[in-house]
Amino acid sequence: MNKKKCLGCGALLQTSNPKEIGYIKDLHYDKAVICERCFRIKHYNEYQTVFKDNKEFVKMLKAINETKDLVILVIDVLNMPENLDFVKELLTNDILLVLTKRDLLPKSVSDEKLLAYIDNYHIKYVDKVLISSRKNYQLDLLLNKIMKYKHSKNVYVVGYTNAGKSTMINKYIYNYVKEIGMITTSMIPSTTIDNISVKINEELTLIDTPGILKEGSILYYVDYQIIKKILLEKEIKPKIYQIKTKQNIHIENILKVTCKESNILTFYVSNALVFYRTYGDMEEEIKLKRHILNVSDNSDIVIEDLGFIKVKKQAKIELYTLEGVKIFIRKALI
Ligand SMILES: Nc1nc2c(ncn2[C@@H]2O[C@H](COP(=O)(O)OP(=O)(O)OP(=O)(O)O)[C@@H](O)[C@H]2O)c(=O)[nH]1
Ligand SMILES: [Mg+2]
């Protein structure tokens, strides 16, 4: 059988194992351009999470490093990772930093502030751009920079899973190739399975890559109904809570924050999530894991892939969330 790749996720199409990536029924193989999993994501919004081994990413990044081509590093502005160690350790390519999903944060926050913030990663880059693929914001500017900094026709698009890499490339296909982008995108992590080359013009081919796994992502620990709420793709309306003593703020049944002293907490999470307050000591939540956090003035508590909570005053905060979900503290983004 000749080898053909799924145009949606990049996996090699195969007809032997329905449980493996790239599966397509024998009778559809000749005509098929996408695998069954991509078909289901595209047409029925169904999802099937595929976990790749981190060793495969290391291999992939080493191969990109060999090429010396320009790398576009895509970062989701709402879900900035704690660090970019994988880049520091494995990539020596020139890096063009792209902060995306700008549309999710309030317009009142300045672009300059958001762009300045990524210098906290202490990563060497040739340039940086803030974009929104959803709103077609600054994509022309980014393209100009890509053309300016690229070393060859090939430019790799790299980043954590769900950052918005494939959506950005589809937008370039739509804007410049005048076709509907075929790359499968979804709110579920690990949508892209293997590299996908997309020719934008004679001088430029963008290469989409599978996202690096974020092990502590909340998306791995909640059901699809909650995932849909977490990833509601509208501008976030921050929820500000003036906390008095012994109050608890809850988000659905996935998070609880307790503050023993008065404070101001601002939640930057999807508007679709349901909040409620309770008062006083609560009986121990068995399902949720407790984190005791010593937070300084103007810091964010980041809950991986859920969003973040800005804390105004230095405090000791108790936060409960699902076991396995990563929590970290950083200097306030906004
Ligand atoms: N609001 C908003 N959502 C976006 C934007 N770009 C991507 N998304 C959404 O983010 C989610 C992930 O997008 P993908 O393009 O599949 O992300 P990816 O980086 O290719 O993910 P993997 O293939 O898993 O590595 C999807 O639900 C997209 O609709 C954007 O500019 N704004
Ligand atoms: Mg993708």
Image (cartoon, rainbow, N blue to C red):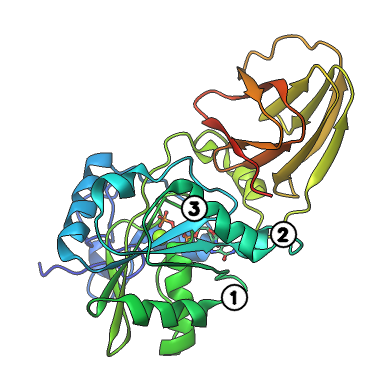
- Crowd class of label 1 (few under 14; some 14 to 19; many from 20; radius 10 Å): some
Q: What residue is shown with label 1?
A: 137
Q: What residue type is labelled 2?
A: Val
Give 217 or 79, whichever is nearer the viewer. 79
Q: What residue is shown with label 3?
A: 119
Question: Which is more foreground, mark 2 or mark 3?
Answer: 3
Question: Which is more foreground, mark 3 or mark 1?
Answer: 3
Q: Is mark 2 on a helix, strand or loop?
A: loop
Q: Which of marks 3 and 1 is nearer the N terminus?
A: 3
Q: What element carries label 1?
A: loop
Q: What residue type is labelled 3?
A: Asp
- For disc 3, does the CB lie below 8 Å from ligand 1? no
- Crowd class of label 3 (few under 14; some 14 to 19; many from 20; radius 10 Å): few
The residue at 45%/74% (across/down) is 170
Q: Do the residues labelled 3 and 1 touch (CB within 8 Å)?
A: no
**How far from the left and from the top, in percent, is residue 234?**
70, 60
Q: Earlier in the sequence, mark 1 or mark 2?
A: 2
Q: Is mark 3 on a helix, strand or loop?
A: helix
- For disc 1, does the CB lie below 8 Å from ligand 1? yes
Q: What residue is shown with label 2?
A: 109
The N terminus - image quarter = bottom left
**How far from the left and from the top, in percent, is residue 281?**
81, 10
The residue at 89%/23% (across/down) is 244
